[in-house]
Amino acid sequence: MARFSLIQTNFTAGELSPRMYGRVDIARYQNGAMIIENCWPVVHGGAMRRYGTLHCGQAKYADREAVLVPYVFNTQQAYMCEFGDLYVRIWFPDGSYSGVELVSPYSLAMLRQFEYVQGADTMFLFHNGVEINRLRRITNTEWSLAPAPFVTKPFAERGINFATSMTLSSPAVGTGRTLTSAASAFLASDVGREVWSGSGVAKITAVTSATVATVDVLNAFPSATVATWSLQGSPQAANTLGAATPVGAIVTMTLATDGWRPGDVGKFVKINGGLLEITTYTSPTVVSGIIRSAPTSATASPANAWSLEASVWNAIDGYPATGTLFEQRLHVAGSPSFPQTVWSSKTGESLNFQLGTKDDDATSFTVSSDQINPILHMAQVKTLVALTYGGEFTITGGIEKPITPTNIQVKNQSVYGTSSVRPIRIGNELYFIQRAGRKLRAMGYKYDSDAYGSPDMSVLAEHITQSGVISMAYQQEPESFLFAVRADGVLPTLTVDRDQDVVGWARQITDGAFESVASIPVEGGDQVWAVVRRTINGQTVRHIERFVDGCQVDDGIAATSVGGQSTWTGLGHLEGKTVDIVADGVVMQQQVVIGGQVTLPRDANNVQIGLHFSSRVKTLTPEVQGGTGTAQGNSMRIGEITLRFLNTTGCKVRGPQGLDQTISFRNLGENVLDQPPPNFSGVKRLEHLGWERGEAQLEIIQDQPLPFHLLCVIKKMTIND
């Protein structure tokens, strides 16, 4: 019979996967736990009861999801934005609703895909089905959300797309085919342009009327009649400028034959080394435009020596799906028609995407790989990063040089692929969810390999993300926690400090389901907000809540009465629910909310009232080596345990045989009744916890709405063969 005194000094490995229960040989087994629920492993080693949440208000729609987006101008001016089905509402950092509601272009189906980046007082919003929008705060109660007023968007020779059908006399390859359009489409200068539809290509050789043209079919069309088609290239006619200078002047552009269309307004003309934006349509041969960059001369430019170009961000080709700010440029990417193209604005001018070759000019480039990998996220961590469905890329301008139109390097660092969840930067690493939605990876520079690695941060707790992660947020202060909402409403958290080698997962659960999280800076650190779906009085509701240090209930209120009172209102959002009550630091009997209020048996000055949650830590079976080998599989008896606490009031211990023992934290004596039990720091001992074959697990539970911080567990054990 061997006797041992064993100590678990910390829980920094967090909750381990059941797949790890046999890995008693690794160090993290000694620092891990079987269950850490509604607790946080902290960097210093202990396990602390998580913060509760205070109720802010109800989301606009109870039957539809909403997501939270932080708007941070500075640490004193930070707001939480509630984006829902075609609306956005603004919340103040104290949890109150500002009364500001804006019309949003983002529908319910878009909420999980749209991205954002903020610089100063401007936030850019991205979704591949909506043009880039800009959210701005003018005052606390005056906000605007509208399409970003770009000076110049990226453009190319895109031709014209027709949503009406066309019919060919024969879709097969051959000359002299007759093409008939269902709507007016052709002008004289279209002779020489090409018609595309699917894999079919035809070159126009003559225009008979606005609806009829003669073509040579170069590539066969799938059928004689097609529903949509496009006219490629620019008008095939000489173009003469009214003047070549100065920049900003309005000048005419005259074609030798009909070629301009009313829809050309807003498009760009590259001619004689200059650029003009069409502002007015006068006739099929004359338009006017503003000189954006001066041509070398006003000499007539023949066909194919000038081009008519349109923005590549449009309803047909789609819009950028993601973007970030890096090196004084706005970088955007991921449009449906250009899934691997990155556009970078002019240096210092986020709204100017006029391409050029100077170092500070806007530029575009393609992240090439051996397969089509749409760019899902743009981010930065030491360098510009493009995360795609099939791999992770870094984009640099060379050694210690910025990105310029003539100096771009793109390197594929890994091939894990990313999901649609917006990545989070923590320190010098970029945390992203892998493509399948389960693994959390941390992309960072590795000096030993001179490359960027992306290790799996959930490898020892693969179960923690079992239903897939749908939302993430990061709290840097006062504790370093990453929050990751699961699809089933559980909220895994990761305590992370790479310098201290702390990577510890835990699970946070509530009476309901978490759906979205975000954080904003407040006095003393960062505050995490959540959208929580709950069932109240038999009805589904969605509440906006915020985690608050010192709060011991969920979806609760924290109220004060200077003179004291027994009836407390403001609980209409919990009508019919059984709630925990802490009055002046004393736990009161639970009550059911009726009429939006509860009545205490005595007056109180300060209360916390809200939904109950229990915190628990379940230890793993320890491993010791004896004279006959491992202790695993032997009969084990925990004769005595010593628990070291910090600022804790109350808990109970469940032993190997499932029996509960309550630890007393209140001392008897004078003037202790009607007083809250003091927070305790020190050690508590329990004896006679029982035998179990092959197991020696303990469960330490805090099921009261009171503080709990477990520092270490010391076990005196007897092990028999």
Image: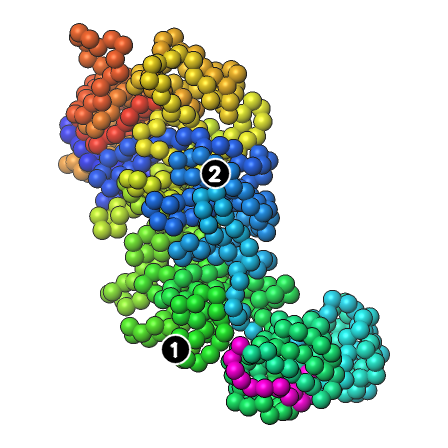
Q: Quadrant of the N terminus?
A: top left
Is 501 located above or below residue 293 in the figure? above
Distance of label 2 from label 1 (alpha carbons): 44 Å
The image quarter containing residue 177 is bottom right
Task: Give whichever of 402, 667 is nearer the camera.
Answer: 402
Is 309 located above or below residue 300 in the figure? above
Q: Quadrant of the C terminus?
A: top left
Residue 98 is marked as: 2
The image quarter containing residue 530 is top left
Residue 359 is marked as: 1
Residue that appears at 18% across and 38% down: 625
Residue that appears at 22% across and 38% down: 45
Residue type highlighted by circle 2: Ser
Q: Is residue 714 visible?
A: yes
The overriding secondary structure of the stretch rendered in magenta is: loop
Q: Is residue 487 visible?
A: no
Q: Picture coordinates of residue 305 (x, y %)?
A: 60, 89
Is 533 located above or below residue 338 in the figure? above
Residue type highlighted by circle 1: Asp
Q: Give the magenta range.
A: 235-248
Structural crowding at the residue carrying mark 1, measured as other residues with C-alpha within 10 Å and reported as few (<14), some (14–19) or many (≥20): some
Task: Give whichever of 237, 626 is nearer the camera.
Answer: 237
